[in-house]
Amino acid sequence: MRSFAPLSAAAFFAATAVASFEDNLNYDSPSRRHEGLGIDVPLVSRRSWKRSDIAYTPDQLNFTHGVASGDPYSDSVILWTRVAPTRESSDSTVAVSGTAGLYSHETEAYIKADANPICVDWNVYEEKKGKPSDKVVSKGKAYTTSDIDFTLKVEAKGLKPFTRYYYQFTVCDSDNKSPMGRTKTAPKEKDDVTGINLAVFSCSNYPNGYFNAYGNAARKDDMDYVVHLGDYLYETKVGGPRATEPQSAIFSLHDYRTRHGQYRGDADLQLLSQNFPWVATWDDHEFANNGYKDGFSALNNTENSFLNTGRQATVDTRKVHAVRAYFEWMPIRQVDMDDGLRVWRSFKMGKLLDLIVLDTRNYDRSITSLGWNDHYIDLIRDDPSRTLMGSRQENWFYRSLSESKERGAAWRIIGNQIVFSRTYTNDKGSMSGDNWNGYIANRNRTLQHLYDNNIGNNVFLAGDSHKNWVSDLAWLGTKDYDSETGEGAIGVEFAGTAVSSSGYDGPIEPNAGNTSRDLIRLNEEMMWQEGYYRGYFRLAITKEEVKAHFYGSPSVATRNSWDLPLANFTVASGANHLSRPIAGGKAESGAIRFGEIVHTNLTLNTDTGKWEVIGFDQMYYKK
C-alpha cells in the first residue's frame, strides 16, 4: 500500500481554494472550442494566495444586483448573484485577451487584476408554508474575482423534482447576506404533472421605458418558470431619463458587462429574477442588431460599415465579448461544452411537455436583412441552402421533436426568437427578411417534419417583433387549411409583444387598429394581431389544453403596477389549432378574426389587487 504524507495547512488551503473557484461556473468557458473565454482557475488561485493582504472586509462588499436562478433540472438549479465593492463593472479582459491570457497570467494586465478573491457561502432551504424553513438541503462555498466581474454562479444539487426552494448567499464569516431568493426545480422526465405555468417575455429596452411587465408578473405570482426569448438588453446608445450605460454603443467586454449591470439594476427585473427561475435565450440585440453568423446590420460587408463600426471591433471579437458577458450575468448553464457558443437546449418537464429552446439568430444563421440588401434577400428567401439554425442545430431540433412524441410528452413548446408564421405586410405580398419569412425553405422543412411524422400539439413561441401575433400553424399552399375551423393546422403560434421596446404609435384607434385589421385581412392563418401595448403572455399548460393569457402595460413612461388583460386563447389537446370562437369572440385591442374588439381599459393594479378603468396618453419615454 502506498502511503501519503499529510498535506500542509497551506497546501490543503490551496487545494480547497481551487475547488471553491471551480464551483463558480463563471470561471468556465461557455464553449471548449473557445478556451480563451475561460479562466485558468489554478493560476487565479496562485495569483490570489500569493498576496497576504485582504482586499475587502465584509462591510465593504455589497450584493449589488440581487439574486437570480435559472435552467431548472429535476434535481438541480443554477443560482446567481454578484458581490462586489462597487456597482461598476470590471474592465478586466483576461477572459478574452488571446493566448497570453491562457498560458501566462503574470502579465502586467493580469497583475493589475484584483488581488484577492471574495468568498461566498450559499444555502438552499426547504419551503414551509410558503416561507423558507431552517432546513438546509444544499449548500456550498465559492469564490469570485474581478476576472469575472465579481459574478457568482453555482449549481445547487441534490434537490427534489418540481419543488419550490429558497436560497441565499452570504459573504463568508459575516452577516452580510443577499436578498432571499426563491426558485423551483423541474419535474422528472416520467413524472405525471397536472399543470405547468410559463410567463413569456422578450424585448426589454431600458431607455425606452420601465419594465412594468416584469413587476406585474412577479406580483401576480401565478407561474412556475419564466421564459425569455431574447433582446434581454439592447446594444445601442440612447439618452433621456433612463440613458444607457455606457453612453455609447457597446463593443468591449467592459461595455457589455456595464450594460448587463445597468439592466439588472432595474427593480422589476430584480423582483422577477429573485422569485422565479428563468430559461433564457438570446436574440440579436444581446450582440448587435440583425445579427447572423458573419455579421450585423452595422458591420455588413460594406466599405462604410468597416470604416465606421469595423474600427471598434471585428464581428468575432464583438461576439466573444457579448457571449462572455451574457454567460457571466445570466443564470444559464453550459450546454454542450464541445460546441461553439451554443445556447440551444431542451428541458423535459414530466410527461406534460418538452420545452425546446432554439437559437435562430447567432449560432449558424445565413445572411439576413441588413437594410441595404433587402432586394437580394427577396431573391433568395426560397433558397434551400438558407438556414436559420445551421445543419447541426436543425437536425437536433427535428430529433427533439420526434423524441418528444416518442416519449409521450403531451406538448411541444418551442421557444424561438422570431415570428414563424407566414406574414404578408401589405397587398403587394411583401414579407420581412429578418424572420422565418426570409428563410422559407427552412420553415418548409420544419413543417414537413411535423406533418410527415404526425407530430401534433406544437406551440411555437416568438418575440423580436414588439407586437402580439396569434396564428394557427399551417403549411399554406401545401396542406389544406380551413381558416374558419382551423382544420389542417399542425399547431399554434403565440408571438408576444415587447416588455418596453417600441410598437405601433397611437392613438389605439384608428392608427394602431387599422394596421392590425390590415394584417388580419392579409393573412388567413392569423387570428389576432395587436401592436400598441407593451407586456407579456402567460401559458397555463395541462394535458387537456394550453391556455394563453396576454397582458398589456398601459404605459411604460412611468414605473407603475397596471396590468391590462388583452386576450385569452385556448388550444385543446389533439386539435392542433386555436379553439373557436377565437379568444371567446372578443379582445381588448388590435384586430381579431371572427370576433370584435371591445376597449374597456379595465386594468388590475398588481400592487393593491384592485380593478379600475385606467387611461394613459403616453406609452413611452419622450426622448
Image (cartoon, grey):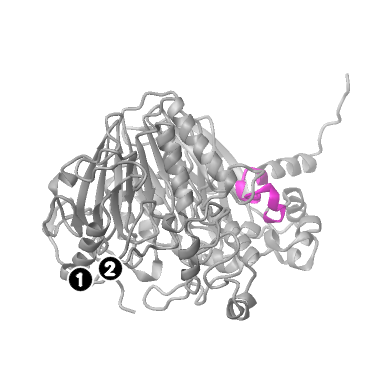
Relative side of 62 to 423, left or right: right
From mark 1 to mark 2, how far is it between C-alphas?
Answer: 8 Å
As helix, strand or loop, the secondary structure at mark 1 comes to: helix
* Residue named by callout 1: 511
Relative side of 284 to 271, left or right: right
Q: Main secondary structure of the magenta part?
A: helix
At 29% across and 54% down in the image, what residue appears?
Answer: 469
Relative side of 462 to 143, left or right: left
Q: Can you give x and y, in whole percent of width and height, for residue 126 in the image?
A: 42, 32
As helix, strand or loop, the secondary structure at mark 2 comes to: loop
At 61% across and 42% down in the image, what residue appears?
Answer: 336
The quadrant of the rendering that contains the N terminus is top right
* Residue named by callout 2: 504
Which of 259/180 is in front? Answer: 259
Q: Amino acid at mark 1?
A: Asn
Relative side of 113 to 533, left or right: right
Residue 115 found in image quarter = bottom right
Q: Can you give x and y, in whole percent of width and height, for residue 228 in the image?
A: 41, 51
Residue 392 found in image quarter = top right
Question: Which residues are the magenta region?
Answer: 21-37
The quadrant of the rendering that contains the C terminus is bottom left
Judge the density around disc 1: few (<14), some (14-19), many (≥20) Cα neighbours within 10 Å.
few
Q: Amino acid at mark 2?
A: Tyr
Which of 524/97 is in front? Answer: 524
- List the single residue furthest toward the right: 2
- List the single residue furthest toward the top: 1
Q: Can you give x and y, in whole percent of width and height, for residue 7 in the image?
A: 81, 35
Q: Can you give x and y, in whole percent of width and height, for residue 347 in the image?
A: 47, 36
Q: Is residue 353 magenta?
A: no
Q: Is residue 412 above or below residue 115?
A: above
Q: Answer yes or no: do the residues labelled 1 and 2 have beta carbons within 8 Å?
A: yes
| Disc with the residue nearer the chain's start (1 vs 2) | 2
